[in-house]
Image (cartoon, helix red, strand yellow):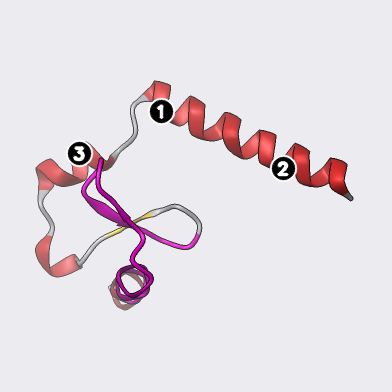
């Protein structure tokens, strides 16, 4: 619980809020939330759809490839 809360505080301080999913994102893009105020509906909404996850994975892969080529 302490790790979850610390990640949430850091994401909130850095203002990494995703307005579409109504949550904060950690430094690696993971969902962060205040463990004291878990809202099941908001949590479900924060899970990307299959299409969104495919897009996210493709963007990450493209970024890794771009960085590899730059080296």
Q: Is residue 69 magenta?
A: no
**Residue receiving disc 3:** 44
Residue beneath the point at 36% across and 60% down: 16
| Foreground label between 1 and 3 | 1
Cα–Cα gap, marks 1 and 3: 14 Å
- Residue 11 x %, y %: 36, 68
- Residue 57 x %, y %: 55, 33
Cα–Cα gap, marks 1 and 2: 18 Å
Tell me: residue 58, above or below residue 47.
Answer: above
Chain part drawn in magenta: 6-27
Q: How many neighbours does mark 2 have within 10 angstroms: few (below 14), some (14-19), or many (20 or more)?
A: few
Q: Residue furthest top?
A: 51
Q: Is residue 12 magenta?
A: yes
- Residue 33 x %, y %: 24, 61
Residue beneath the point at 33% across and 27% down: 49
**Residue receiving disc 1:** 52
What is the quadrant of residue 58 in the picture? top right
Count of numbered badges drawn on the protein: 3
Q: Which mark is residue 64?
A: 2
Cα–Cα gap, marks 3 and 2: 29 Å
What is the quadrant of residue 41 in the picture? top left
- Secondary structure at badge 1 equals helix
- Secondary structure at badge 2 equals helix
| Foreground pick, 47 / 55 | 55
């Amino acid at each position: 619980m302490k790790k979850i809360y610390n990640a949430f505080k850091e994401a909130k301080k850095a203002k990494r809020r995703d307005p579409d999913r109504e949550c904060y994102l950690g430094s690696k893009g993971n969902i962060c939330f205040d463990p004291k105020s878990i809202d099941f509906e908001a949590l479900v909404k924060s899970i990307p759809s299959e299409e969104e996850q495919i897009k996210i994975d493709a963007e990450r892969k493209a970024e890794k490839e771009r960085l590899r080529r730059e080296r």
